[in-house]
Image (tube, rainbow, N blue to C red):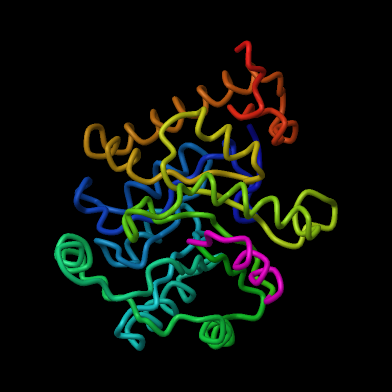
């Protein structure tokens, strides 16, 4: 089960994605998630919209080596100040959310952005990303979270992004968006054809989240080309019911399910997972 996630060795290819307002499910908020990830030897992406000060999140970690998720918000000065605070605390990588840069209106706004205080800036663009990158340390790894098309994935390669996370924000930004797993298949195929993944000269890292609820879901994403898979709502549910121990137990269950699924397709190691491990209904013999 060992693999590298964001350049760090982990014991499972399942990590904890960034979610806003961890205090909704745990009194110590994001500090709970940091500790659970460390116990499970995996990664937790610290969210911009944290329920506790970033300094408290970093203090809960045994090292300063944490990834930070960045929103470019309507108050750009405040969001960039927060970004630099994370860098000063020791952030090892920046994950920029790129699928939520349209101000929301109506009922969806009241239920989401209005409740969390997230007011995205509509100015996020490739040029704006370049400006932001220029303000960061030269060697800082940068990942784009929310890529959903092959075209954007190839553009990320061309501008030198460290990696991308194929995601539709768990369906929360646009409820009728294409399923993230279908996006992953298109993105991975395009990157593979361009020689950006799948070979010794890999040019970009590929990850996936949105809709993962079982080890079988993890298997599908890994077969399609993802290096590792993020979970969101499930670990909030686990934390709400059983706190830190609940998240650790969840990761153990998902990893065990993944191991069983790998055995069923005859893959003894993660690097043996490939698209041909999956069967599509359209390609099945009619007698089945």
Q: Is residue 178 magenta?
A: no
Residue furthest top in the image: 287
Residue 244 occupies which quadrant of the picture? top left
From what the image shows, is residue 200 above or below residue 74?
above
Q: Is residue 221 left or right of residue 36?
A: right
In the image shown, does 42 or 278 lie closer to the viewer?
Answer: 278
Q: Is residue 52 left or right of residue 16?
A: left
Query: At x 72% / y 57%, what residue is drawn?
Result: 191
Residue extent of the magenta highlight:
146-159
- The N terminus - image quarter: top right
Q: Is residue 151 magenta?
A: yes
Q: Position of residue 29 (x, y in %)?
A: 26, 53
At 76% from the left and 59% from the top, the residue drawn is 196
Vertical comparison of 148 with 273: above or below = below
Say whether residue 159 is left or right of residue 65: right
The location of residue 203, given as percent across then percent down, is: 76, 62
Between 31 and 151, the one nearer to me in the picture: 151
> What x and y, as percent, mark residue 261?
58, 21
**33, 143: nearer the viewer:** 143
Q: Quadrant of residue 242?
A: top left
Q: Residue at x 62, y 39 (%)?
A: 222
**Residue in view at x 43 percent, y 66 percent:** 99
Above or below residue 106? Residue 282 is above
Magenta stretch secondary structure, dominant: helix
């Amino acid at each position: 089960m060992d693999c590298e996630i964001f350049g760090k060795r982990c014991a499972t290819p399942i990590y904890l994605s960034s979610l806003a307002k961890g205090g909704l499910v745990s009194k110590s908020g994001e500090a709970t998630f940091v500790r659970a990830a460390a116990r499970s030897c995996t990664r937790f992406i610290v969210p911009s919209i944290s329920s506790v000060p970033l300094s408290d999140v970093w203090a809960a970690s045994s090292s300063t080596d944490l990834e930070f998720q960045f929103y470019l918000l309507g108050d750009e000065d405040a969001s960039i100040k927060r970004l630099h605070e994370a860098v000063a605390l020791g952030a090892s990588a920046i994950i920029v959310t790129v699928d939520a840069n349209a101000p929301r209106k109506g009922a969806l706004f009241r239920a989401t952005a209005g409740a969390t205080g997230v007011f995205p800036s509509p100015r996020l663009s490739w040029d704006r990303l370049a400006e932001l990158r220029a303000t960061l340390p030269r060697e800082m790894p940068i990942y784009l979270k929310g890529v959903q098309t092959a075209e954007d994935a190839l553009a990320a390669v061309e501008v030198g992004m460290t990696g991308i996370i194929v995601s539709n924000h768990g369906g929360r930004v646009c409820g009728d968006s294409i399923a993230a797993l279908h996006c992953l298949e298109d993105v991975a195929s395009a990157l593979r054809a361009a020689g950006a993944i799948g070979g010794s000269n890999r040019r970009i890292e590929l990850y996936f989240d949105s809709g993962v609820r079982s080890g079988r879901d993890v298997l599908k994403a890994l077969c399609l080309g993802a290096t590792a898979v993020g979970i969101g709502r499930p670990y909030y549910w686990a934390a709400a019911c059983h706190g830190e121990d609940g998240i650790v137990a969840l990761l153990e269950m998902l990893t065990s399910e993944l191991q069983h699924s790998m055995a069923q397709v005859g893959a003894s190691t993660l690097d043996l997972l490939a698209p041909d491990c999956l069967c599509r209904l359209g390609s099945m013999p009619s007698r089945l």
